[in-house]
Image (cartoon, coloured by chain):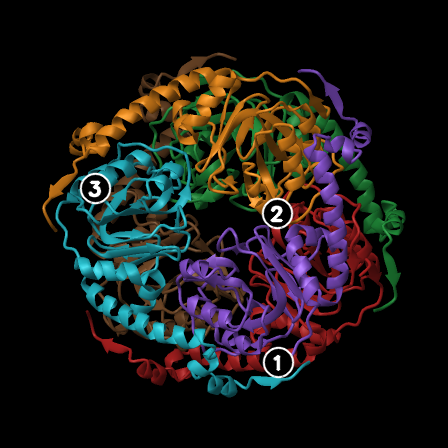
Chain colours: A green, B red, C brown, D orange, E purple, F cyan
């Protein structure tokens, strides 16, 4: 299919996106049946990085960021750029100037299956980024690609408008049409976990709380006082 | 041998454990003849993580944390959980709820040859963890294993009650029965190093301080003013 | 050629070195035609590490730091030690005592294609280090090597007196004889980027600013409102 | 969406599949605009492995091959199983008995983003396999998944009935609906390359054949007799 | 404990060792409850490598093969050397001369958690080797270690006299005292698998043969004719 | 320095090159003081690959093989192309057509710190290649670089005319001016090893042959009959 930039995308409800962002990656992963997590080599460039927003997808050649510039124009405040090079790359395809441009247009963060650079400056800007690599090796602005088409990024399919949540555990994708339901299931999980947390904090054992003693018994695990 | 949970273990002297914790991983590694260090892929999840305690060993299936729950029950305050999956795993086998349960029972920290998740929350709790990976990918609570048996974790044999010390350099295991002697040798080393540090800080050269000039001479290394 | 220690080296102008240090790794990499960056596995041991100085090169056996001690003697304040083992190594060839000695002699930082240890202490000293690995595994002081000869470190040729700049993006080498010119080109780039930054910050698009719309058109990229 | 097994899939034309198989991975990759190649960690388990067939997709839990058994039932002779675990896995999820079952039902080969075992036996059967790992670590037959749904395998989206081609260069996916056109473009490329091969074999230089001298000149590359 | 060479070790029954060798790594791994497999980075240096024998364990410094020479003296025909460096190493610690010496003394093969070299020659000798790396980087003959003590090699505890089996799937360790029982269980498994193989080869589906249809039903997996 | 193609290079004596080729990588590495080996990730694409020749160096952009074409023109029969991309790359920068062109011009083999493709065809041609990766991902013919300048390839400095030897152990570089002396030292080593081999083959122990018993004694290694 021809390369193209799609200007308008559908997004999930802003409140749902905000709620998912508060739930975090691990909770969402569980809430949607243990799916949607990007490969764990995707790491935040600083420890407090956290983001939730609508996916503005970018498909570009390895080591070429022309299409990221094209994407900035069509984004709306709160969107998250998610970039997949068509061939493998670890070069620094995103730096501080692009981060400045993103910030000016309200882009909430970046997820890129390649490298980034200017890490000190981007950290100082508190612009959250998840990447495969940190590399000063530079890139070009000359190769064709697409914006807002379905992409595969770090092992997951991402469609424009899907919800992207990133934190210290990595990055998870929530399909746009499932976002409300996942947020509901996540909230339930959070709520259940809050109760678990209280009881575990008070010293109740997971063995009792989760009813695991029966399981240990069925598995034939012996308890002995000492060897 | 059958799967089992051993309730009581012998521990090293508390004061010895404390002393080893202050000495740190590199010093202990040297003090015990350059042994006991876990593979260097075991990294702390936050920079200030530091721990010393008695090993509460856990052997469990890959991606299953049932036995970690079983271990919490038999631990004593100050123990360190050390977990080895029987097959290779990078899944997030430990999260914030388990950390909360550990904290409630006085567990001092975790060393796991697999993945962890909820890293932001665990960091906020200041619960020290060393792991092979960070991954949101979830696990089960259904597989048999053992607590407080000899295990191999990240390349080292660990017996229940061995002393585990972790810091930014990684993790080291001190055999329980050797702990007092290793602590003594470590203290000697620290003491020697303190003197070295003073002299080096004052500008004395390592060449002079360690008597290395003779060695350089024997090795036939030429000194030339310039090329 | 025989092993040797070269006492005197030529250095770039101190002001040029300072200027390059402020420009940072990515800018310099671009200014000198996308060359000189060390392999990206060279990472700083703490996030705020930053250095610029003249290369004091060290060639040593794997797992042996005798020659690093020899190098400290011939360094001048502001020099940066850059160490390449002749065979591959990840052992902790540099620790806090060596850092103390380096600090006493004004060494500004370390770049080592091997491992380091005592990371907590070295971080507390604010002594900047870039390494391939963190490992408590110890080393010896007994093997022959050279100081201030041409070396290959992490994929780049380094000559004594070349300028080394390190920051969060990694490490870059500037040939001594090219340093003034590279600093000039880097300053131009910084200056250009400052203008770009202002305009991008004000919301001008990279597409307009860099004149990329024509390129997108030539590449036949379609703009569509929605799929 | 619920887990399901889809019994009937559409396939590309058999002759087109055969033609693509003869063209090989690199040619197809080029013919379809440098897309569709799986991550390069997917390697054949023996050097002469080669396959082309219709994708019978399998989504299964990490370390669980129940769904592969389910897939064998619905395959047709010449199909290629392509398996993606929902979470990362390197365990040996496929062995000689499954290969025997596959062979009995005419399955032409396997592509799996996980581990395989019984490599000697599978090689002796000449059953072609591409995998991420070789591992004796065993798996289960108890987890839910799907057969013949869209999956992501080693970085590429694969739909049931897409054409899979594997050889020593790796694995490439051709979308079913594009197969005829890609085969045509591939044949053209092969044909062009055959002419190129003849002329290059006869000693004509690539510089002349591809008209690259002008390019070298434009790039300002100097020719010098000697340094 | 002091470094030592233990001259005499107990071995498993020769017939049992032979039987285990025929069963192969994957079968044994299963027969002993999915334990004993070395890390999968241990690969044979040539495809037809296969071995079974009693472990002659060697603990040595990284990059030093003195203790391997010491081990050759105390081995008996059919033994397999298994070598673990005390610190991580990928250097070529074993080459063709050592292989020649091993062959002269009846050593059946080598398993080494480090590097080997002279791979062409060792392959020509048909001397089976499993290693972590292939590297021409040389080593020394000067460091203390032990022969026939308990070691950890590539993630598994190995005692002198344990049975080592290696093939294309990797390496597995069978505890000496368990060897007869494991061989019996392995033979049962082989026998069961032979029946499975016949029925699978005849076209019976794994779904029927293993009774998996009920499981699929319980898991709620839908069968649909087409999407 | 400007990009350039150097037409004429000095080469080592043909007989010396041939002799080095027979000695192999490990022997040469030792003969020249354990230097010159490329990083061990450089692996041959087929097991019987073996080469010795004069280095025709190529510096090119990542993923661009224009300069390889330029190099073919200036090579002489028996030369070995050695290619280093200026930035990191694993793309398939060399394929069967280039191999055909190389063969036509007498190029003896290829060493490339990047990827190759068409591996089946190149193997069938028996054209020896050592690479960092195998990848079908394609490249361009449009970027500037140089031929016959000093390069760094996989961790080693290579000058035009240096001798390159490759076999199953990897690749080693011999400086042109040292080639005769290294070949002489290698021959001595081969000759010594031949005698060693005879005695080791006859059953003499390395302990006796190399006089290592004294060393074991000095190291305080105890001999015990059994534990």
Residue assigned mark 3: F71
Tell me if C189 is positioned left or right of D134 in this view. left
Residue E7, numbered circle: 1
- Residue C12, visible in the rendered structure: no
Q: Look at 70% across and 30% down and name the residue there.
A: E203
| Residue C67 place in picture, x, y as percent | 36, 73
The image quadrant of residue F220 is bottom right
Name the chain letter of the residue that bears numbered label 3: F
| Residue A134 place in picture, x, y as percent | 45, 45
Tell me if E99 is positioned left or right of F143 in this view. right
Q: Look at 64% across and 53% down and name the residue there.
A: E24
Residue B134, numbered circle: 2
Does mark 1 fall on the same chain as mark 2? no
| Residue B67 place in picture, x, y as percent | 78, 53
The image quadrant of residue E51 is bottom right
State whether residue D173 is above or below residue D116: above
Q: Look at 48% across and 65% down and name the residue there.
A: C91
Q: Are marks 1 and 3 in contact (CB under 8 Å)?
A: no
State whether residue E27 is above or below residue D145: below
């Amino acid at each position: 299919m021809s390369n193209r930039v799609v200007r308008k995308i559908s997004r999930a409800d802003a409140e749902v996106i905000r709620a998912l962002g508060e739930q975090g990656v691990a909770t969402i992963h569980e809430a949607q049946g243990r799916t949607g997590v990007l490969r764990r080599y995707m790491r935040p460039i600083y420890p407090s990085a956290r983001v939730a927003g609508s996916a503005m997808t970018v498909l570009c050649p390895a080591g070429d960021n022309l299409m990221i510039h094209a994407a900035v124009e069509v984004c709306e405040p709160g969107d998250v750029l998610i970039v997949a090079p068509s061939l493998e790359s670890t070069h620094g395809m995103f730096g501080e100037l692009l981060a400045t441009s993103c910030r000016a247009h309200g882009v909430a963060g970046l997820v890129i299956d390649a490298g980034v650079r200017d890490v000190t400056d981007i950290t100082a800007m508190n612009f959250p980024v998840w990447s495969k690599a940190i590399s000063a090796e530079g890139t070009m602005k000359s190769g064709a690609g697409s914006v807002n088409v379905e992409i595969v990024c770090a092992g997951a399919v991402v469609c424009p408008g899907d919800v992207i949540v990133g934190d210290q555990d990595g990055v998870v994708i929530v399909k746009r049409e499932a976002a409300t339901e996942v947020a509901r299931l996540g909230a339930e999980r959070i709520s259940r976990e809050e109760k678990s947390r209280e009881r575990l904090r008070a010293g109740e054992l997971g063995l009792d709380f989760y009813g695991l003693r029966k399981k240990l018994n069925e598995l034939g695990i012996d308890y002995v006082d000492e060897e």
